[in-house]
Image: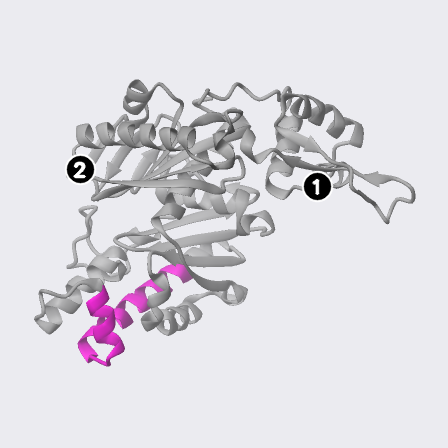
Amino acid sequence: MRTAPRLPLATPAAVEVLTRILTQGPIARVEIARKTGLSQAAVTKAVAPLVEAGYVVDAPSARDDTVIGRPVSPLSVVESSVAAIGIKVTPGELFGVVTDLRANIRIARSKTLPDTSPETALDLLAILVGELLAAVETGDSPLSTGTTALAGVGVSVSGDVDATAGVVRHSAFMGWRDLPLGALLHERINLPVVVTNDVRALTVAEHWFGIGVNANSFAIVTIGSGIGCGLYLNGDVVEGAHGVAGEIGHLPLAPENLVCTCGRHGCVETVASSDAILARVREDTGRAELDLAGAIDLAHAGDEQARAAFDRAGQVIGSALAAMVNLAGPELVVIAGEGVADYDLYDHRIRAAFAQHAFGAAADCELTIRSHTFDDWARGAAATVIRSYIRTEPPF
């Protein structure tokens, strides 16, 4: 697959026009003009080279009832014109996807990660990229026609990530510090590489292709082995001056004697992560053989010690959510994670604690729970590639 050339976007206005078509299309020129403040002539000027280059299709098909006699020309991106690879890194496995230009997953693969050493991870990342590209070439997806260009590869990792430099400053789960992951992977695959925090990547995907398309503000809180939070405020995903923002998993709301994987004491994660809940249930019940599913089953069966562990987690998560909503004021919070739909055990406690601590009208913030898979995490990494490619941000 050939590498995608630079998009024919001469001005910031052209970037804004393409972004509208990508995230809200099919959309008429008149609607783009209304939403961006540009004239229809300016919109047409921005669109023309994109249509000529095959990234956008112009398909007049209807009439605008508000403007007598004038046909509507809805604009859409050609989804198969550009592909992106996204990979989610976990301590035991790499999850990779190939998406089209609208971040629809077309191909998915995974690869076991036997250890978390940087060399092992980089070698297997390069192998997985090769396998994904081969799957495109030999498959029958819309990306396999030979006309699709690859924008680049996105890699999402938990922890403190400098996305601009492509450096993993600290990932407690992977045991990495100051790892120039972007540069090292680029050396192996010779493709543009975007490295970002996994929760922020998930937030980018929701911003451009999910709930963020029509929301003025939102937050995504992920619950799993760690607890993360991504924020979309004032028209964009919050990056933070130092690349760190929304880390509610490390608010000091838990008992001071509990040590977090980050090395600090009393973090929310020490009580509310899935690992912390399982450890507490094992300790209190004396059943070291339990896995998380077993702990959930035990709590559902009414075991008081298991239920107490989930109750405590829900109390701390709800308090953390209230603190975040009091500070940032999103209109919607999505609580997500692998198997999070099974966590009805602490849903009531989360909502009760949130209501107890949310200040004033912040209590009106909608809380919703949604499960997702590791492929969704990988899709987030692909979405960061698409966004950087459209915006001509590094490494493009």
Residue 265: x, y in percent?
Answer: 19, 53
Q: In percent of the image, x 26 and y 43: which residue is there? A: 90
Q: Which type of secondary structure does the marked residue at label 1 adopt?
A: strand
Front residue (pair 281, 67):
67
Tell me the quarter of the picture where residue 331 sits.
bottom right
Q: In percent of the image, x 46 and y 26: which residue is there? A: 150
First to last magenta residue range: 293-322
Amino acid type at mark 2: Thr
Q: Is residue 99 left or right of residue 189?
A: right
Q: Which type of secondary structure does the marked residue at label 2 adopt?
A: loop
- Which mark sits nearer the N-terminus, 1 or 2? 1
State whether residue 255 appears in this view: no
Q: Main secondary structure of the magenta part?
A: helix
Tell me the quarter of the picture where residue 297 sits.
bottom left
Q: In percent of the image, x 34 and y 48: which residue is there? A: 374
Front residue (pair 253, 109):
109
Q: Residues within 10 Å of mark 2 (few under 14, many from 20)?
A: some
Q: Residues within 10 Å of mark 1 (few under 14, many from 20)?
A: some
Please determine whether, in this image, residue 134 is positioned above or below residue 22: above
Residue 122: x, y in percent?
Answer: 24, 28
Residue 254: x, y in percent?
Answer: 24, 61
Q: In percent of the image, x 61 and y 20: which residue is there? A: 8
Tell me the quarter of the picture where residue 13 sits.
top right
Q: Which residue is mark 2?
A: 116
Please determine whether, in this image, residue 331 is positioned above or below residue 294: above
Amino acid type at mark 1: Ile
Q: How many marks?
A: 2
Judging from the image, the colouring scheme is: one colour
State whether residue 313 appears in this view: yes
**Label 1, label 2: how far apart the Cα atoms are:** 45 Å
Q: Which residue is mark 1?
A: 27
